[in-house]
Amino acid sequence: MSTARAARPAIAREDRIVVPYRRVSVAALMANTILVLLGGFFVLPMLWMIFASVDSNPDWAIKLPNLTLSNFVDVLTTAGALTSFRASLILAGTTTVVTTVLAMLAAYPLSRHHIPLRRTFMLVILFASGLPVSMLLVPVYQLYVTLGWLDSLYTTALFLAASSLPFAIWLMKNFIDAVPEELEHAAAIDGASTFRILRQLILPLTLPGIAVTSIYTFIQAWGAFLIPFVLNSNPDDQPGPIEIYNFMGSHGLFKFGDLAVFSLLFSLPVVALYLLMSRYFSGAFNFSGAVRG
Amino acid sequence: MATMAGLGPRLDRERFQWSSLAMLGPALVLLGLLFVFPVLYACYLGFTNLELIGSRSHDYSFTGLDNLTRMLGDYVFVKSSQLTIIFVVGSAIVGQSVLGMALALLLRSALPPIRLTVGAIVIVAWVLPEITVALVWYAFSQAGGTLSILLGHRDADYLVLVPMLIVSVANLWRNVAFSMLVFAAGLRNLPREVLEAAEVEGASVWRRYGQVIFPLMRQTIVTNLLLVTILNLSEFTLIYAMTQGGPGVETMTLPLYVYQEAFNFHQLGYGTAISLVLVLIGAVFSLLFVRAARNQV
């Protein structure tokens, strides 16, 4: 096929930036066109939220807005909106602190010390992070009833922490594994205690890893819906996702613009956090050999 | 000080240290209380007639295989299992993997501005909170929403007409970035010499992909399939926020059915039993993929 030959430059190599676009082939043109169309498919649903947030009279469809900032003023002066931001912050913040500290403490001995059945333990951890949360809902609900832990953001955060801990330990262990062990041997020979090594050596050297683990945990907890939905029914303490869900449920009784503003404001922090860390995150998608551990 | 030989413990052999346990302790306590115990408890509750309210909320008992028998006669459960398989195979295994691979390949040959823009948009769709995705897709597919206008039927509510298709596409829209990133990393790791050799030898595009690139990426592809299956099998928020499983039970996948039985119909024991089936389905898929990975050279 002639198009097949023409497609040769489409196999992009590292030098594609150096070789300019003189040889724009049919295939490359097609690839770019398809990408632009796909980009449109991805951006279209999001545009509604952005346009409706600054439109004085929005509906379900995307349309050019009658520019106004009144929706933002509405949301930012509503007590309910601010309360749910506070609830989300408490929930995600507590989850992140608990998860990161415990994962850090657990990952160090798993990476460095001699622990019997360590491999089995890591495999169980990996398996645990794949279990559906639906399975734990009823037993955890029963447990929370017994302990009197229902309807509190802090105890809800504890369960979120427990469910994100397996993956966080796995992530942290990989980051600590990457730190050369010689430094610690030197410190140990000089008489430093394990905790001192952890605090003064491992902590600063794995700072990017700690940042990735905590930001990943925060993003997950910020968006968590099902767990707070079941465990925390206190109407004064509903985090953002449940607030948005309740909005959607009161079909037509709310202002589209306010809903769009609220979800936009609610989404911005996690998108910003992700972009901040994207350079470090990209390494996490390198699975070559990861399965074999 | 452990600097003098003979005074401290032997340093040439790894030993179990009590400090390891002290550091693992807090994580073990939390995981034990809120993970291991609930998992074991679920395995028990799935075989009981526990209910949320009424006499069976405290006076429940082990009922053996009653819940299983009840499932087999429960047409919603059968329907729900089918929907779950359709969702996972259609939206995740086929949809996300194929579109993710297509995006990863297309992005390699795209002009830099297009590559950066489209790549960023796809990733933002993935980073957005799930509830936001549910909201924008709800708006998109409503009667009078953008989709109905684009397709020329302004009064058509696509969440009622083709609900399963819409939630599957919304889920694909949200999660495809994951596969895209995994495949992009896999493509970057391909040995360049082999690709160049294939090109120099004049292999056609189809042969280069079918006989060189995809076989080399087998490990990455299988890993992606495994992860995507496990992640999507337990999908709840997106579907629930858009449809609550409806209209009727048209989008009632197993995680939603577990929630409905347990917390709307108060059947805690039966709901847990359904969640065990969900775990079983995940285990079967995982075994198949691990097998596929092992059969490799």
Image (spheres, grey):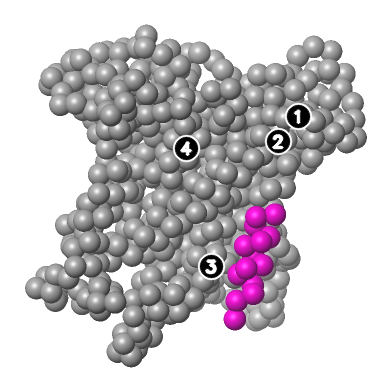
Amino acid at the residue labelled 4: Leu
Amino acid at the residue labelled 3: Ala
Give whichever of discs 4 and 1 has the lower sequence position. Answer: 1
> Is disc 1 in contact with disc 2, using a CB cutoff of under 8 Å?
yes
Question: How far from the left and from the top, in percent, is residue B68?
Answer: 82, 36
> Is disc 4 in contact with disc 2, using a CB cutoff of under 8 Å?
no
Q: At 42% from the left edge and 38% from the top edge, which residue is drawn?
A: B170
Q: Which mark is residue B78?
A: 2
Q: At 50% from the left edge and 13% from the top edge, which residue is drawn?
A: A235
Chain under callout 4: B
For residue A274, say whether it is visible. Answer: yes
Q: The residue tagged with tag 1: helix, strand or loop? A: loop
**Which residue is label 4 attached to?**
B165
Q: Is residue B62 left or right of residue B292?
A: right
Q: Are marks 4 and 1 on the same chain?
A: yes
- C-alpha span from label 4 to label 1: 24 Å
Chain under callout 2: B
Chain under callout 3: A
Q: Is residue B116 above or below residue B276?
A: below
- Give whichever of B65, A172 is nearer the camera: B65
**Which residue is label 3 attached to?**
A290
Question: How far from the left and from the top, in percent, is residue B1?
Answer: 60, 70
Dot 1 alpha-carbon crowd within 10 angstroms: few under 14, some 14 to 19, many 20 or more: few
